[in-house]
Amino acid sequence: MEWAKVASGSEGLELFTREGEYLVNVDGKELMSSYCHVSEDALATVSRRCTTLAMPQIMIGGLGLGFTLAAYIKEFGDGAELSVVEKSPDIIHWYNTYTKRNSVGDLDDSKVNFICNDISKYNPQKRFDVIALDVDNGPEAICGAHNQTLYNRPGLKRIYEQLNPHGTLLLWSAFDSESYIEDARQSGFEVSTEVVDIPETGWTHYIFICKKN
Ligand SMILES: C[S@@+](CC[C@H](N)C(=O)[O-])C[C@H]1O[C@@H](n2cnc3c(N)ncnc32)[C@H](O)[C@@H]1O
C-alpha cells in the first residue's frame, strides 16, 4: 500500500500515513517513522539509569512523532520536569492533530513544557540533569546545517554548560562515530556507548552517553 501524503511543512518536511502508521520525510529522505521506535524509547531507560534525582530536569530535542516523549512520560511519570524543544511548528501541529494519538496515546502530556525553538540556538534559563538529542540521524546535520553546531567541540562545550554537575547528554544515532566520541571527550565529557540491536529489523542503533564530570 502506498504512503498517502497528509501534509507538507516548511524546510522540506512532509508527513505521510499508511494503515495508521506515520512517516516524516525531510527533503525526500526518511527522518522518522512509527514502525520501529525501540532505540528512541531506549533514551528514556538509559536516562533513568543516569540519574537518581527525585525530580530531574530533562530536555528532549526534538519532538518528531512523539515516541521518545511517550517513553519519558512512561519512565518518569510525574517524577521529572520534561521540556521538549522542537524547531518546526509544523511538527508540533502534526503532533497535536495526527501523530500524538499513535505515540503518546492516553498518556498525560499536559505537564510537558513544549518549546518551539531551535535547540542549537536555544539558551535555556535553567540547567538540566539530562539533555537527550534525537534531531538528526546521528552526529551529522540533516535537519539544517546549523545542527552541526550541536556536534562539534564548541557546540558540545555549550551543551556541557547547559547541564547541571553530573548531568548527562544522550545522543541518539543510527551509526557509530569515533570522531563524535573523541570530540565529546575533548569537550570534558566521559563517554560510553549503549548499542541497541533490534533483531526484528536487523538495525543497530547507538546512544552516546556523555557524562559531565
Ligand atoms: C528524528 S526526529 C525525532 C524523532 C523522535 N525521537 C520520536 O520519537 O518521534 C527529529 C526531530 O527533531 C526536530 N529538529 C531537527 N533539528 C532541530 C533543532 N535544531 N532544534 C529542535 N528540533 C529539531 C525535527 O523537526 C524532528 O521533529
Image: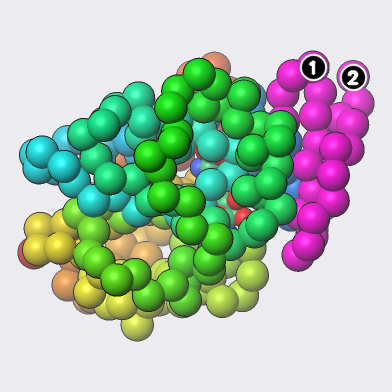
Say if 7 sits above or below 152 in the image.
above
Most extreme residue toward the front is: 110
State which tag comes first along the sequence, 2 or 1: 2
The residue indicated by pointer 2 is: 1
Q: Nearer the viewer, residue 98 or 180?
A: 98
- Element on which disc 1 rests: loop
- Would residue 103 be counted in the magenta stretch? no
Q: Where, quadrant-wise, is the C terminus in this rendering?
A: bottom left
Amino acid type at circle 1 is Glu
Element at label 2: loop
| Residue 115 in the figure: left or right of residue 161 | right
Please say if 148 is above or below 25: below
Q: Looking at the image, do the residues carrying marks 2 and 1 touch, with CB atoms under 8 Å apart?
A: yes
The circle on residue 110 is: none
Residue drawn at point x = 63 percent, y = 48 percent? 92
Q: Amino acid at mark 2?
A: Met
Coloring basis for residues: rainbow
Q: Which segment did they paint magenta?
A: 1-22
Q: Pick the residue in front: 2 or 74.
A: 74
Q: Quadrant of the N terminus?
A: top right
The x and y percentages for residue 66 are 54, 37
Would residue 204 be seen by someone viewing this image from the given angle?
A: no
Q: Mark 1 highlights which residue?
A: 19
